[in-house]
């Protein structure tokens, strides 16, 4: 059984002295991967291609930046190395592998969600540790990473699901502060997810 309270407490302690760089790093990655154009239906002809292009760019770089963010977060939690912005771009040397991993997970979750929401959630939870595993073991193949994530999450899917649910209040606070609070909520959640990963990885 995972102690959510302990994970959250440890995460807050680990962020002491690291809030600035953690906020900057998570904001940068979120901005790069979530950049979108909002447009009205009658603007589709004018901006549809631009929005489509941005979505494609986001898809192409999600894998490599997510893996880099995992390295950054692991450095915050383990303190093996000082976290830095260079962590975010560290895995461009295995870009094709990160792209392939992200595409497989995205397609699998997408198909599961199309069939019914619950299978999509289960698949997402099953492969939730993949980018952490790749960040720590870049020599592993995509198949090995996915297999290890599935094995690692065996018996812990509900624990992670409940951990994510426990942050709903924090997300709400972030939203009602016109998004400003999200700058603190996002790194808090990501560090907590990293602590979760290390807990189940060491069992």
Image: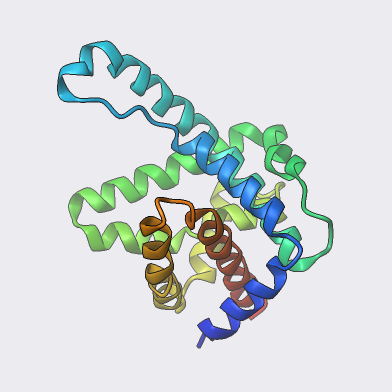
Q: Is residue 47 above or below residue 161?
A: above
Q: Is residue 67 left or right of residue 52?
A: right
Residue lying farthest front? 177
The residue that appears at 63% across and 33% down in the rendered structure is 95
Q: Position of residue 86 (x, y in %)?
A: 76, 40
Foreground pick, 5 / 177: 177
Residue lying farthest top? 46
Q: How is the image coloured?
A: rainbow
Q: Is residue 6 left or right of residue 138?
A: left
Q: Is residue 29 above or below residue 56?
A: below
The residue that appears at 50% across and 30% down in the rendered structure is 60
Q: Position of residue 166 (x, y in %)?
A: 41, 75
Foreground pick, 100 / 37: 37
Q: Is residue 127 left or right of residue 87?
A: left
Q: Is residue 109 above or below residue 151?
A: above
The residue that appears at 43% across and 59% down in the rendered structure is 174
Q: Position of residue 90 (x, y in %)?
A: 73, 39
Q: Position of residue 2 (x, y in %)?
A: 52, 84
Q: Quadrant of residue 197?
A: bottom right
The residue that appears at 51% across and 82% down in the rendered structure is 4
Q: Quadrant of residue 144?
A: bottom right
Q: Quadrant of residue 91?
A: top right
* Quarter of the image with the C terminus in it: bottom right
């Amino acid at each position: 059984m995972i102690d959510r309270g302990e994970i959250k407490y440890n995460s807050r302690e680990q962020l002491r002295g690291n809030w600035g760089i953690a906020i900057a790093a998570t904001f940068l990655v979120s901005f790069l991967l979530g950049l979108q154009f909002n447009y009205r239906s009658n603007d589709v002809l004018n901006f549809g291609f631009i929005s489509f292009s941005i979505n494609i760019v986001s898809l192409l770089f999600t894998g490599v930046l997510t893996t880099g963010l995992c390295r950054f977060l692991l450095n915050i939690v383990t303190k093996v190395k000082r976290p830095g912005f260079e962590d975010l771009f560290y895995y461009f040397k295995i870009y094709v592998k990160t792209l392939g991993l992200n595409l497989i997970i995205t397609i699998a979750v997408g198909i599961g969600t199309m069939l019914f929401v619950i299978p999509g959630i289960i698949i997402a939870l099953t492969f939730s540790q993949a980018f952490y595993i790749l960040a720590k073991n870049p020599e592993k193949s995509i198949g090995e990473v996915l297999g290890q994530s599935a094995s690692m999450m065996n018996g812990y899917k509900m624990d992670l699901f409940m951990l994510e649910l426990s942050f709903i209040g924090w997300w709400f606070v972030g939203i009602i502060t016109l998004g400003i609070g999200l700058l603190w909520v996002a790194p808090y959640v990501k560090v907590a997810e990293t602590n979760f990963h290390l807990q189940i990885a060491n069992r």
